[in-house]
Image (cartoon, coloured by chain):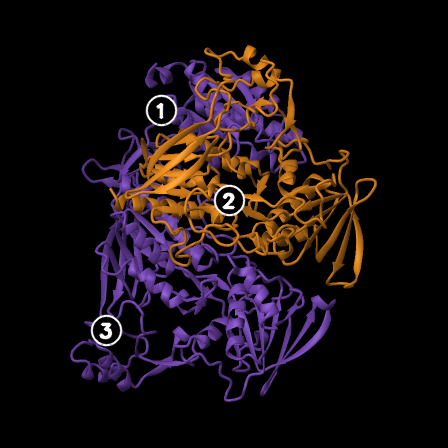
Amino acid sequence: MKKYHSIVVGAGIAGMEASLNLAAQGYKVLLVEKEPSIGGNMIGLSKVFPTLDCSSCITTPKMSETAHSDNIEVMTYAEVSSIEKQETGFKVTVLKKPRYVSEKHCIGCKKCEDVCPVYVKHEFERELGAKKAVCIPFTTAIPQTAVLDPKYCMQCGKCYDVCPTEPKSIEFDQEPETLDFEASSVIIASGFKLTDIDRKKEYSTGKEKNVVAAMQMERILAPSGPFGSVMRPSDGKLPENVAFILCAGSRDKSIGVPYCSRVCCMYSIKQAMLLSGALPIADITIYYMDIRAFGKGYEQFYRNAEAMGIKFVKAKVSKVKELENTDLELSIEEIETSGSPKKIVHDLVIMANGILPEIDQLKMSNVGTDKYGFIKQEKMKYDPQVTNIEGLYFAGVAGGPKDITDTIAEAGAAAMKASIYINSNK
Amino acid sequence: MTELEKTNDAPRIGVYVCHCGGNISDVIDVKRVAEEIGKMSGVTLSTDYIFMCSDPGQQKIKEAIKAGTINRVVVAACSPRLHELTFRRALTSVGLNPFLLEHVNIREQGSWVHKMDHEGATEKAIRLARGAVEKVRLAKPLDMLEIKSLPSALIIGAGPAGLRAAADLSRRNSTVYLVEKTPFTGGNTVKMGKLYPTKEDAKEIISKLNEGIHNNLKVVLFTNAEIVDSVGGIGNFKTKIKQVSRGILSPMTVAEFKEAQAVCPVEVDDEFNYKISKRKAIYMPYDTAYPQMPAIDWNNCNQCGKCAEVANGKIDLNKKEELIEIETGIVIVATGYEHYQPYEGEYGFGKNPNIITLPQLIRMLDEKGPTKGAITYKGKKIKNIGFIHCVGSRQQDGADSNNPEKRLNAHCSRVCCTATLQAINEVKEQMPKVNIYDLYQDIRTYGRDAEELYYETASKSGTLFFRYNPMQLPKVTVDKDSIKVVVKDLLTQGEEMEIEMDMLVLATGMLPGDPGVFADKYKMPKSIDRFLQEVHPKLRPVETAIGGIFLAGTVQAPFDTTETTAIAAAAAVKAASILEGGTVHLEPFVAVVDKIKCKGHGNCIKVCPAAGAIFINKENNKAEVNPVLCISCGNCVAVCPERAIDVQGFEIEKFEKIVDEIIKV
């Protein structure tokens, strides 16, 4: 059984940063990622607050460094199916999903992608664009290895024929593989998903064409995004009157997410600023309960948005209704001016979806979680990365919503804890 | 092909123009840039790509080098601060010397600043890239400087950040010198009462952190100590610490301490309780303070000697100062924050004793504190208590201009909302019948389980919330024994409310603390909010512009205790990767003296800002450079009458060529 100093679950920004910090100290790391590429949610973002750096600019070098480190072995498209604490260290079982493309032979030439006749919804573009049934997951994916989706593949064999490698990289007969590993320590950095857009039925049934989820907006705003510019999904019209609804998946007991997701105020303000840059004449309104701009430079960022002319309205939106022309009518109660109910029409509405834990990857160990499924912090106030299992630490949103900066700090801290643990058991 | 063979060949320059997704290519015609540069002599490849920093982007460079098409590289992209290292690594990975790379910035200095001028930005990019081509043409392979690092660390400040980092680093076999300016550990945090959401007392939290350094042979704690000087750099910082004696020679028994306190005639405001109580000149701020030894307050002790008489020889009232020199490989600055202090008259502060700050209220709520948990109001029962948020935080021009310092604190202090609500609940628990008024801008209970605290406060405690406009702050009028607050409440469409209160609590925020002489010595950069600045909030969040110096905790920005200790551990892990390896690699861009030309005038020494970086070798009367200390500023180059000194990698000749290309008609 192959042995590592640490196994890190999840190759988003937290998992990569933790792995890099361990690798820098000479420890051997296995980094397991369930998606076909490393990079996590962050690689899908447009720009990041409060510096407005493009997200790719910060994520891709970390991805590249992770993939090229001599001390880090990356395993993508693989799910951890169990983490067992043993007398010394852990036994970790990983299910390697079939990619139907050989990781060893594929050279990432994209010829298969060119000839594949099947178009499917593109997950990376949050279903706003299309991709082929066999393709490289996205432009900056690591590894640059195609992945074939058997759900949609009609086995026409065109990809096989065109594949230039010897032997052929398309392997229709791949099977799932179960692999066992040993590790002295484990870091869980399994990240998050967002609340579905129809979680709050008053806001969306999932069918309104111009009600856009936060991550979709990130893709629309990304320079390399699905539309190539900012337009609304239903008809490609340039939006003129845009609404952001904050707390559309958080701070709401009625949908089971009473907690604050901590990043939505800031990502919405950022999106509004980018939107205002792309569409200088558009009216942009942010409907909010409290603006929570608490990090370094965030308050100033918020004030800048105000100065740019973005309207902040303290109001709880009670309903969003699609009109015939696919515009949206918001029923709101404007708290600060009239206090009476109002109906306002916008042509594009963006939901600040809330953060949920990626629970599947947590069930595999006996790590303690809170009632929402986030990892419990046993020594929260003085050793925050510690869980109920000795030698198993967490980093990032697996332990509650937080922004990228805070996540990166935790990743460093988790690596510190793991390295102390590894050292004490040498 | 060996590296030598690759680099000794005539230059074959590869040029890569990055789109940066669209960050560059939306403004600059990248294809035209690549095409224009492709026409230059010696440029064997010139192309563009969507994300050069991505793996496939880097792969393009590597393949061309492997194929022998190129042996010099120019990348026209973002700031070299962001990705020069990325591309250097790419060169190294295929055996090409990393200093045969030139990274030219056409984003921050191109597309971002010339958004409206596509033609001009493209022209500028071409000129900059041409300069880079000329520079790389003259480039020679260089080696990184290798420096041995001492396996020890200096940590300044023994609050939660310093304690966490010290405990962690010491467990990785580094010797840690932990320097604290007061006689006790715990910083400001230890005074903060019950911390939400675990509701453990801050003193317990600090005790747990103290355990990490107590009886730990790897940690040397200096209390009553401050940094007075420091020189050197990563791998070897030489720091002078001035430690003032504690006045106590060995641990005292409780009886001895009590008696010594009893006989002490000096009474002063107790800063531990934010001056709501008095203490003696021999003191311990609280029972479990660490180290478990009282201290003499030299500023106030009159040296009457009464305490010494009763203390069985354990007290020495001769104040002694000792200078200690330590050498460490790295430094972590964890000097923390200061509380905002309201100025006289701000919300009536100072005009009525019942207008207090949140930290003062928190001290009152401490069952073991100065009032034994009672909220005092000169014998009268408190019926109405109000809280104002954002005092000293989120200040705006026009509204907060009365501040005598004429300086606005625009930042949010992050912790005060949660701390205020926690305090409100404690007040309510103690006095169920009290009316509570909360005046806020936004309630920022962002933390774990903190939203529940907000619900609880709003529903169970019956607290009335009023939202004020930051441009129309609440007005407080004070007469002899009443406090009147007028607030325009936005939650009721701006209706003006007048509230009478028996007590008003100002939720004061965090200000940057004074990071002391050390920060001055190394000219550590500050952010616009005056907290110390990191290199980049996401790429290098705990590192500073000065190699080997790290930040931990609220010296950087407001954070709560959980966040602070996480960041401290993150700083420790960065330190550990230097200290563990024992060697540090530095860029070779340092001054180099041409021994033949140098006549030993010494002009270079006069203009050198880095102490000790350049000196005259008495044996041959020639200048010599200590590469570890050299900061590559180039001052020496400018003043050398013999042109005998140059900065390696940035030679004058290269600059001449770059300028020629940029101004070429």
- The reply to the same-chain question for discs 2 and 3 is no
Secondary structure of the residue carrying numbered label 3: loop
Q: Quadrant of the N terminus of chain B?
A: top left
Marks 3 and 1 share the same chain: yes
The quarter of the rendered structure image containing the C terminus of chain B is: top right
Q: Is residue B633 shown above or below A75?
A: below
**Residue wearing tag 2:** A359
Q: Is residue B408 left or right of residue B547?
A: right
Label 3 belongs to which residue?
Answer: B247
**A153 or B243, which lies in front?**
A153
Q: Chain of mark 3?
A: B
Furthest residue in direction bottom, as rendered: B379
Residue B494: x, y in percent? Answer: 73, 68
Q: Residues within 10 Å of mark 2 (few under 14, many from 20)?
A: some
Colour of chain B in the rendered structure image: purple
What is the crowding at mark 3: few (fewer than 14 residues within 10 Å), some, or many (at least 20)? many
Chain letter of the residue beneath label 1 in the structure image? B
**What's the amino acid at mark 3?**
Gly
Which mark is in front, 3 or 1?
3
Q: Colour of chain A?
A: orange
Viewer-proximal residue, B659 or A43? A43
| Secondary structure at numbered mark 2 | helix
Q: Which residue is mark 1?
A: B141
Instruction: Mark yes or no: residue B543 visible.
Output: no
> With B475 as the anchor, is B48 left or right in this view?
left
Q: Is the residue A205 above or below the residue B492 in the image? A: above
Q: Nearer the viewer, residue A50 or A191?
A: A191
Q: Residue at x 41, y 51 (%)?
A: B567
Picture quarter containing residue B100? top left
Q: Amino acid at mark 1?
A: Pro
Q: CA distance from mark 3 to mark 1?
A: 59 Å
Mark 2 to mark 1: distance in Å? 51 Å
